[in-house]
Amino acid sequence: MYVSLGEILMGSRKENRAAFKKILLLLIITSCTLIAAGPPASADSENGAEPLLSKTPLEIEIAVNPDKNANCLKASERGAIKLVVLGSSALNVTGIDPDSLKISSEKNAAVVYPSAFIYEDISEDGFEDLVLEVNCHKMLVELGIRNCFCNSIPLNVRGELKDGSSEIKGTGMTLILPSLL
């Protein structure tokens, strides 16, 4: 016996409603199974190749204003601030793509970019460091941290390695001082 979808939806017969519920349950189970399985595997994962970026970012150590006695910024400070990605035996900073680096804070979603960079052993530990120069006033205003007086503020640095194998991230802390000090 042929039953139209209209008859099932109208619920004209008790057995049609039962059949509709079974079909609906089968569709729900199939959908859930497909969602749980995730997206189809790519050709790269089938042949054993790793994805380009690792899922867990490589943690880097950041120093803010390392050449100053106190790690602080005045709210009215002009010029450049130094953020340093510290090199180590585990991290050769020349492998970092400087153009991918961005600085953010927890105050808002804005980011600022370094205006210049150099390689230098700032920490004097025998490992080259990546020294980033950032416009201080622009950073304070755009990241919304200019009025965070007497608070220690995290400056987050994110980027990736030149070979695209990993994302990098790190946080350096700085104290924001009122302009009068």
Image (cartoon, rainbow, N blue to C red):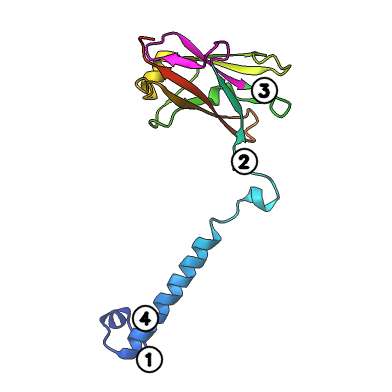
10 Å crowding of disc 3: few (<14), some (14-19), many (20+): many
Q: Position of residue 175 (x, y in %)?
A: 46, 20
Figure quadrant of the N terminus: bottom left
Left/right of residue 55 with respect to residue 110 in the rendered view: right
First along the sequence among labels 4 and 2 = 4
Please give left or right for residue 3 compared with residue 66 in the image: left
Of the numbered discs 3 and 2, the one sitting upstream in the chain is: 2
Q: Which residue is mark 3?
A: 87
| Alpha carbons under labels 3 and 1: distance apart | 76 Å
Q: Which residue is mark 1?
A: 1
Residue 131 falls within the magenta-colored stretch? no
Q: Amino acid at mark 2?
A: Ser
Q: Any mark on residue 136, and which?
A: none
| Stretch of the chain drawn in magenta | 65-85
Say if 179 sits above or below 9 in the image: above
Residue receiving disc 4: 20
At label 2, counting other C-alpha atoms closer than 10 Å, the crowd grade (few under 14, some 14-19, many 20 or more) is few
Query: Distance of mark 3 from mark 2, alpha carbons?
Result: 20 Å
Q: Amino acid at mark 3?
A: Gly
Q: Secondary structure at mark 2?
A: loop
The mark nearer the N terminus, 4 or 1, is 1
Mark 2 highlights which residue?
Answer: 54
User: In the figure, residue 129 lies in which quadrant?
Assistant: top right
